[in-house]
Image (spheres, coloured by chain):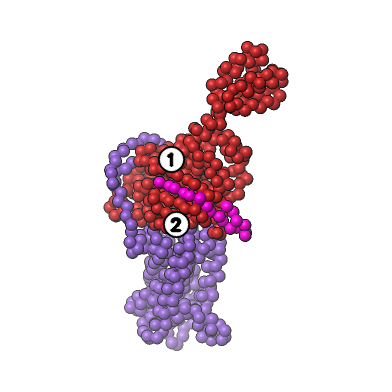
Amino acid sequence: MTIEITERRGSAAGAAAVRRTSVHAAPVGIVTDIGNVFVRELMPVLRNPASVLFAMVQPLVFLALFAPLLPETTTGSALQWFVPGIVSMTALMSASFTGANLSEEIISGSFERLLVSPVRRSALLVGKSLREMVPLVLQTLVIVLAVAPFAFDVHVVGIVSGIAVLVPFSVGLGALSLALAVVAKDQAWVFWTVQQTAIFPLLLLAGVLLPVDGAPAWLQTAADLNPLRYIVDAERVLFAGDYPADTIAAGLAGSLVVGVLGLWVGVKAMRGAR
Amino acid sequence: MIRTVGLTRHFTRNKQTIEAVRGLDLEIAPGELVAFLGPNGAGKSTTLRMLTTLIAPTAGTAEVAGYDVTRDRAAVRRSIGYVGQGNAAGHQYRGRDELMSQARAHGLSRRDARARTEELLEAFDLTEHADRPVSRLSGGQRRRLDVAIGLVQEPAILFLDEPSTGLDPQNRVNLQEQVRRLNAELGTTIVITTHYLEEADALAGRVIVIDHGRMIADDTAGALKSALGDLVSMELATTEHAQAAAIRADRIPGAQVTVAGTSVEVRAPFGRSAAPALVADLAAAGTPVTGLEVVGPTLDDVFLNLTGRSLRESDHTAEQTDQHEGEAA
């Protein structure tokens, strides 16, 4: 590669043709490719960490308004039962919102630039989905810190394991949300309609706010098919510092199902993006 | 550098097939500066989107930088820079971060990426604005950032899709200046689409006129215009004088003469050179010219001559296929 020094400045818009660095562009491996996308995704969070709180508004309101209404039970603190549900709900909200950022990028044009760049379609999807881990961790910490002064026991190992169980779910749901944004293209209302329609049944059928145990049979069946339900059950035992293998395994399995399915659908949708 | 053979793209919309691009044969050599000119919906952007791998051709082939746009997309993407109709930089991001990320995507080492980022920021007068969110930049600043991002890996070819839409005249002129210099100083091959006649003229490169998905003219702006000839408009005292003037004007080689009352219009190659003798002859013959105007042809005249429509009018009536590439065929 030749190096040219053309130092010319002065015209109103500066010298477009300045070239001093010798540019060694090269094909990028898939892992680096994913890493580059991931790092780019983190930039808005790094530059403006408060943005992570955006998806938390609803869960924090629920926490503030519901928690005082919870009855004290003989089996333990109601808050202890409620918080893992709120953590799961935050993960659900946050990950399902992530396609909104992509919608914005589709409308503004930066997504098109990425599509024309050498970044693999699969890396775009995976890198963007993996970003979900960051808000998941930060948001869980905020919630735990918020409730720690009250009737809530902090079990560090349980909380860390709880977050780990939620990771595949968050990443997979993020991928689904991204897929939805890709399919909706510049029609952002399609994205919002589907996202809003999908999350509330998921949430209510997971027993986040109220137990589904006493529900009629049809509702039970619907809840049994909801992977989030098993995840919430696992979060509850983990946050309480209990480690029953079957509950945790079921939660992890539910989370992995969403993770694998989400990434598969997401990569498929992203490959069709244009 | 770019070669297409029978490049075709159809869209299906409401069960109707729209032939956005119909069998385009194109050859662009390294170092050329080419403007695709045509009304909205003519197929310019669709062509560009095929050349940049964003959409696949329905039929035909295209090679960009030696790589097939369907079989070797990755290699095409590494070789080209692209400035789309929207903004390259995400609005929540900072300009510096976006340049950095684009450089890394092209495989530059972290050090090189950083150096290249600073160099481009400086070259495009963006250093002061590099740490502000892109959403807070002015339209002109964002466009400069878009071009900078497109140039990160020093592409052999830079594609710009309607880059000056939405820019004020000052920024539009600046952008054209940058594009020209990029082409002249670095030898970057440049393909730009525009529906602004002035822009195709100002870039002073090769102009490919596209209408209804077909190439209808391909030459420099100067050659396209001079082939059409100048328009000499004369006013005479009476209709008889006008008739006499028309007969005299008809002797100019290649002249097309129209008379309307006391006005005579002559469209002729080198009309401006023929006009003085014409005026002198008519004065000597006792049918003097009372008013005279000589106008050089514009690219709009070229388009009008080729299609029977004015490009300015077509802009408002053409189907907006370029914006609605919804359902792929």
Q: Is residue A18 above or below residue B108?
A: above
Residue at 55%, 27% in the rendered image? B269
Residue with the mark numbered 2: B70
Count residues near mark 1 (Cα–Cα under 10 Å), then give few for <14, some for 14-19, many for 20+. many
Give amino acid for label 2: Thr
Q: Measuring from the top left, give residue B291's x and y in whole percent.
A: 63, 20
In the displayed structure image, the side of residue B44 where residue A131 appears, left or right: left
- Subunit bearing disc 1: B
Specify start and end residues of the magenta stretch as a single range: B1-19
CB atoms of marks 2 and 1 within 8 Å: no
Frontmost residue, A138 versus A224: A224
| Residue furthest bottom as drawn | A74
Q: Is residue B177 above or below residue A50?
A: above
Frontmost residue, A12 versus A204: A12
In the rendered image, what is the letter of the chain coloured purple?
Answer: A
Residue at 35%, 63% in the rendered image? A30
Query: In the rendered structure, does residue B161 fall within the stretch colored magenta?
Result: no
Residue with the mark numbered 1: B33
Q: Between disc 2 and disc 1, whose residue precedes?
A: 1
In the displayed structure image, the side of residue B165 where residue A19 appears, left or right: left
Prevailing secondary structure of the magenta residues? strand
Disc nearest the viewer among 2 and 1: 2
Q: Measuring from the top left, give residue A27's x and y in whole percent.
A: 33, 57
- Subunit bearing disc 2: B
Give amino acid for label 1: Leu
To which quarter of the image does residue A149 belong?
A: bottom left
